[in-house]
Image (cartoon, rainbow, N blue to C red):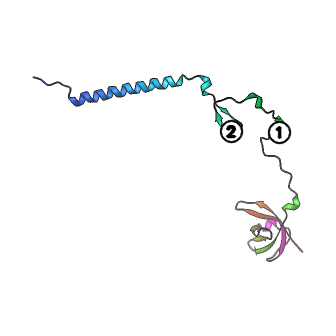
Amino acid sequence: MARSQDSFNKREQEKRRQKKKKDKLQRKEERKAEKTQDFDDMIAYVDEFGNITDTPPDPSEKEKINVEDIEIAVPKQEPIDPADLIRTGVVTYYNQSKGYGFIKDLDSQESIFFHVNGLLDEVQERDKVNFETEMGQKGLNAIKVKLLN
């Protein structure tokens, strides 16, 4: 007698494949059923404390807010007084041949670079000076450097 062409293993694989297909179709139908929710079930509300809830807010507790009171941007700052920008310091290093040096700020104790183009008076090391600062490529630069008497 001749044997069947299908072996036991092939039939089992075919059964598993059919079961997998059937399960996939069933999951697809379940997802479709879930998507048909009512629009009211999908709405969420935010209460006065910032919590998300499914109940709408009470209209009697509404507050009137004046539109002019809402600030969206950063409030304008007062203009800076030019006298506040002037700092005092001591020249700690100055190289006349290369045309640059450093000033140690007396308030913050930081070392600030200056170039000969920013000098208004001739300076030497250990001179007390007034100066203003600006941001350069590598940090603060002293400009308008004046010698104090």
The quarter of the rendered structure image containing the N terminus is top left
Measured Cα–Cα span from mark 2 to mark 1: 20 Å
From which residue to which does the magenta span run?
114-132
Q: How far from the left and from the top, in percent, is residue 27?
A: 43, 27
Residue 61 image-quadrant placement: top right
User: Under tag 2, what secondary structure?
Assistant: loop
Q: Is residue 115 above or below residue 44?
A: below
- Please tell me whether residue 126 belongs to the stretch shown in magenta: yes
The residue that label 2 is drawn on is: 50
The residue that label 1 is drawn on is: 69
Amino acid at pointer 1: Asp
Q: How far from the left and from the top, in percent, is residue 79?
A: 86, 52
Q: Nearer the viewer, residue 88 or 52?
A: 52
Between tags 2 and 1, which lies in front? Answer: 2
Residue drawn at point x = 23 percent, y = 31 percent: 9
Within-10-Å neighbours for mark 1: few <14, some 14–19, many 20+: few
- Please tell me whether residue 105 belongs to the stretch shown in magenta: no
Q: Is residue 143 above or below residue 27?
A: below
Residue 10 image-quadrant placement: top left
Contact between marks 2 and 1 (CB within 8 A): the answer is: no
Q: How far from the left and from the top, in percent, is residue 110?
A: 75, 68
Work out whether mark 2 precedes mark 1 in sequence or the reverse, and give the earlier one.
Answer: 2
Amino acid at pointer 2: Gly
Q: How far from the left and from the top, in percent, is residue 32?
A: 49, 23
Residue drawn at point x = 14 percent, y = 25 percent: 3
Residue 34's label in the rendered image is: none
